[in-house]
Amino acid sequence: MYESKMKSEETDHLFQAVLSLRDVEECYRFFDDLCTIGEIRAMSQRLEVAKMLREGKTFSQISAATGVSSATITRVNKCLSYGSNGYKTVLERCEKE
């Protein structure tokens, strides 16, 4: 089983709640209550950055398209290379759909 620095009973409950969502509409409703617009945008941008990095886009192309900083792109790139494979797992599954 994967062990994370963020592992806690509360985090387990959050992730179980996310896994219980049945469609995009439910996701919008839940995350609208849970997060600020800024938090959702930041997470959305990071996922888009990961997708673009996997597509071979350059940092400058990604920054121009998303408006994110080079520091954020670097962080996402580091996660893709040395992280827990979370981005990879999600992106591969989304590509298949």
Image: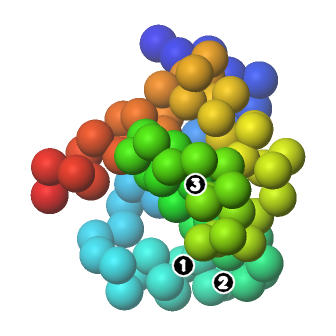
- What residue sits right under mark 2 in the picture? 33
Residue type at numbered disc 3: Val
- What residue sits right under mark 3 in the picture? 49
Mark 2 near mark 1, Cβ–Cβ under 8 Å? yes
Quadrant (top left/top right/bottom left/bottom right) for the C terminus: bottom left
- What residue sits right under mark 1 in the picture? 30
| Disc 3 versus disc 1: nearer the observer | 3
- Establish if 26 lies above or below 96: below
Residue type at numbered disc 2: Asp
Q: Residues within 10 Å of mark 2 (few under 14, many from 20)?
A: few
- Establish if 4 lies above or below 1: below
The quadrant in which residue 42 appears is bottom right
Identify which residue is drawn at 48% across, 26% down. Answer: 85
Distance from Cα at disc 3 to Cα at disc 2: 25 Å
The quadrant in which residue 93 appears is top left
Identify which residue is drawn at 64% across, 35% down. Answer: 77
Relative placement, left or right, of 96 versus 21 is left
